[in-house]
Image (tube, helix red, strand yellow):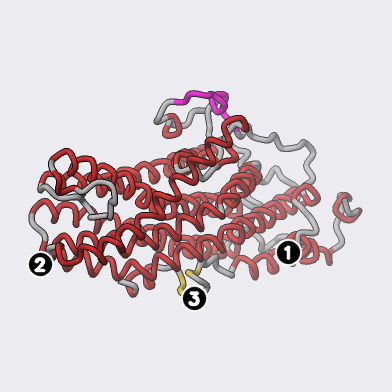
Amino acid sequence: MPECLASAEFDLSLGSSWADAIYRQELTVGDVFVHNEPLAEPELESEHGSSPVEPLLWYLREPTATDLMPSRDGFKYLEYGMMALGWVPQAIDKKYLCIYRMWTMFVIMLAGYLPVGLCITYVKEFSTFTPGELFTSLQAGFNAPAAFTRGVISFLNIWRLMELKKLLDEIDKRCVTEEERIRVHRAVIRGNKIYLLYQFTYSIFVTLTYLTSVCRGLTPWRVYNHFIDWRDGPWSLLSASFIEYIIMSSGVYFNQMTDVYPLIFGFALRSHLQLLCTRIENLRTNPAMSEEQNYFAFSGCIEDHKLILKICDLMRPYISQTTFVQFLFVGLLFGLTMINLMFFADLWMGLASIAYIIALFFQTFPFCFTCNLIESDCENLALALFQSKWIDAPRPYKSALIYFLQNVQQSIRFTAGSIFPISLDTNIKVR
């Protein structure tokens, strides 16, 4: 530890120098935090966290004084979904790893066959389509390559989820009061509810399309099947339709994971930005704390902000790639679905199209809106810092505050393909 930081008194010129050192990662909060008594670290795992069999809704439980979840648990249901798709070999026991990798390849082949099978159908059976069937199939035909591409990107970047959870554990250590940990717990519940909402919405679309098509005596998406001709009879229709349902489900759940992942991340990020804002508002409000203690508390806020920026830098490349692919296709898909709904769909096909429109809405709007809210949170953070009680603070505190304010005023923004800003304005334009 540098001697100047270990001492009880500070040189008046140090204010901005140690703040700059924190942002350049030369110092950590352990170097600048000095307390008469060390802060107690919160327990990051509940006593039930390691249970091999957990209730389905365990991660939606209400907070209690003795049972509070860490931020990483907000990704629990998402991680379960990714495990089901074969994306998380890190969570599998080594003796089952070979079987799990075979399952991973099987699911990827299913999702990869979807755009190929649809293209073969368009080439071989284009003349047999009715307009309504064609537009229903084209919805999947254009979305399938996008879903597969985004799914592969997510699979290749799954390591970011593991690193993200470690960084969230680190920032959770700053939540030392019960009120802060309860707010983290509620953010975890919100993240898991978001996943379940997406799971329900996407499953409803696939199932409705499957059931309505079978009731009308047709296969849902006309994916090419070399082995079963659905026109040979009822059993052939049911078999071919069920195979299509399985193939389409793989593509849809690829889409679901890549849609809900950034959104849950956005909510987790917002919760910690708001917690940091509260800590800044509380600076120098406790008369029992000395100027030295206030000085060190302020350094903790700088460290928190640096860690938040590190989390954003970790996720930014992944979000940029997947959202760019999404923006390229979503406008076309909306147009095809609206044409089908207005001109060619009967009652049952119309219901399936409405479910698809809702699913498309869930693909882009929520995260774009969340990005706007993140920018608003950054503005509130800068205002909270400027309006905090610094007027009568010592010179080192003011020097550090000026430097910190310059960094805080740079809002956290995400872009799609380093071209389009991810915001409501862009979301409206691409439609």
Judging from the image, what secondary structure is the residue with disc 2 in?
A: helix
Q: Nearer the viewer, mark 1 or mark 2?
A: 2
Query: Of the residues under marks 1 and 3, which one precedes in the sequence?
Result: 1
- Taking the spot 43% from the left edge, 66% from the top edge, the residue there is 325
| Cα distance between the residues tagged 3 and 2 | 35 Å
Task: Choose between 187 and 240: the one closer to the eye.
Answer: 240
Left or right side of 300 for 185: left
Magenta span dominant secondary structure: loop
Task: Say above or below: 375 vs 4.
Answer: below
Q: Is residue 193 left or right of residue 239?
A: right
Q: Amino acid at mark 3?
A: Ile
Instruction: Look at mark 3 in the image and give the residue it sits on.
Output: 419
From the viewer's perspective, is residue 398 above or below residue 275? below
User: Gap in Å between the C-alphas at discs 1 and 3?
Assistant: 34 Å
Residue that carries the numbered disc 2 in the rendered image: 343
Query: Residue 214 in the image: x percent, y percent?
Result: 15, 45
Q: Is residue 46 magenta?
A: yes
Secondary element type, mark 3: loop
254 in the magenta segment: no
Instruction: Please say whether residue 341 is visible from this viewpoint.
Output: no
- Judging by the rendered image, the residue that carries numbered circle 1 is 400
Q: Is residue 85 left or right of residue 209?
A: right
Q: Is residue 127 above or below residue 301?
A: below
Q: How many marks?
A: 3
Range of residues picked out in magenta: 45-54
Q: Residues within 10 Å of mark 2 (few under 14, many from 20)?
A: few
Q: Are marks 1 and 3 in contact (CB under 8 Å)?
A: no
| Residue at 29% over, 51% down | 226
Which amino acid is tagged 2? Phe
Q: Disc 1 versus disc 2: distance between alpha carbons? A: 64 Å
Residue drawn at x 14%, y 54% as measured from the top left? 349
